[in-house]
Amino acid sequence: MKKQIALLPGDGIGQEIIHAAKDVLNAVAKQFNHTFVFQTYDIGGVAVDRHETPLPEETISACEKADAILLGAVGGPKWDVYPTHLRPEKGLLGIRKALGLFANLRPVKGFPELLHASPLKEEVVKGSDLLIVRELTGGIYFGKPSERRHDGKEVVDTLVYQRFEIERIVEKGFEAARLRRKHLTSVDKANVMESSRVWREVVEEKSRDYPDVEVEHLLVDAAAMKLITNPTQFDVIVTENLFGDVLSDEASVLTGSLGMLPSASLRSDGVGLYEPVHGSAPDIAGKGIANPVAMVLSAALMLRHSFQMEEEALAIEAAVESVLNEGYHTADLHVKNGKIVGTKEMTERLVDALSSTNATESIMNCYS
Ligand code: IPM
Ligand code: MN
């Protein structure tokens, strides 16, 4: 298969990790006989510097034409003092909105090799395997611009949801749960917020179409607590934009490092943007020590969700598993008796593991 992939490295460690994903994808292409054509575009702070906007028109139209998009990360202290419309984050929110990528999937699965690297007790995190389905193009992130103000005395952000926006993300949650362990936790703040009460109503309504899925409602504060005290109780969590943002960072520590978590941002037709959950880590940018795993696993999600290349996605995931198994990891992880390597070596090891995993399979096929 031939696929066009738009690369948006962005800021900070974005450049380094996109490179890693490209190397791994090139290895996949070679092994499975695909052609991946990469083209790079600006977004975030680099785009502000070069084009005076965090989201140039050229980037939007290239992403619209591409088969899928890989994004590194945006932001950094340099642009923190810029006015709102010139903030790198505007570029990220803008591309999600422009492409209508309303469904953000954030799988959180502990790697057995890293269990002890989690700040939580091993017996608490062991077996946790959950998926956060976060609404991505509505809510307080995109409140009515006319009502958003800050006049020195008063500051206003508005939270707006159209009913159809809630319905389509809740459906995604149910669909995802149906393919997993059939348990859906809907997270809201229905004891306080009107929008949450509508959210809960929609979940109840939709649940009639999914009698096979068990539904539970949790208030966001309780959900935050249970994620830490009993993470294995969760299968799929569906929630609105801001709650999903906060809970997914919290959930990421279950795996030992934020540097391990991939994400997929999708719309209904399969077009998707894939990016790590972590940010641009300006403090370690350019040092060659960034963890490429979340970015590489995001590329695996791209293969799975946008290209229907399940076998190829599994090959990448198996390569990550095998390199971690051998004890190699980047400095962000605190692994007992591990071997710390930089971004480049970690990537080379992933590429090597890809071909050897496949080699093992072919050997097994010979004997079967
Ligand atoms: C994320 C990030 C973004 C968000 C920021 C950078 C705008 O934290 O993808 O989780 O809040 O959505
Ligand atoms: Mn976030």
Image (spheres, rainbow, N blue to C red):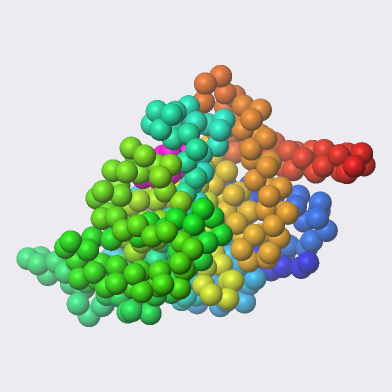
Closer to the camera in the image, 276 or 309 = 309
Query: Bounds of the magenta span?
Result: 250-259
337 versus 48 height, above or below:
above
Between residues 183 and 83, which one lies in front from this camera angle?
Answer: 183
Quadrant hosting residue 362:
top right
In the image, 24: left or right of 233? right
| Direction top: furthest residue | 337
At 54% from the left and 47% from the top, the residue drawn is 294
> Which residue shows up at 46% across the image and 51% down it?
235
> What secondary structure do most residues of the magenta stretch adopt?
helix
Decide if residue 163 is in sight here.
yes
Residue at the image position 16 percent from the left and 69 percent from the top: 156
Residue 116 location in percent, x, y? 48, 27
Check residue 129 for magenta coloring: no
Which quarter of the image is occupied by the N terminus? bottom right
Q: Return the x and y of residue 30 as percentages of the image width and height.
A: 81, 53
Q: Tell me: residue 274, above or below residue 271.
A: above
Quadrant in which the C terminus is drawn: top right
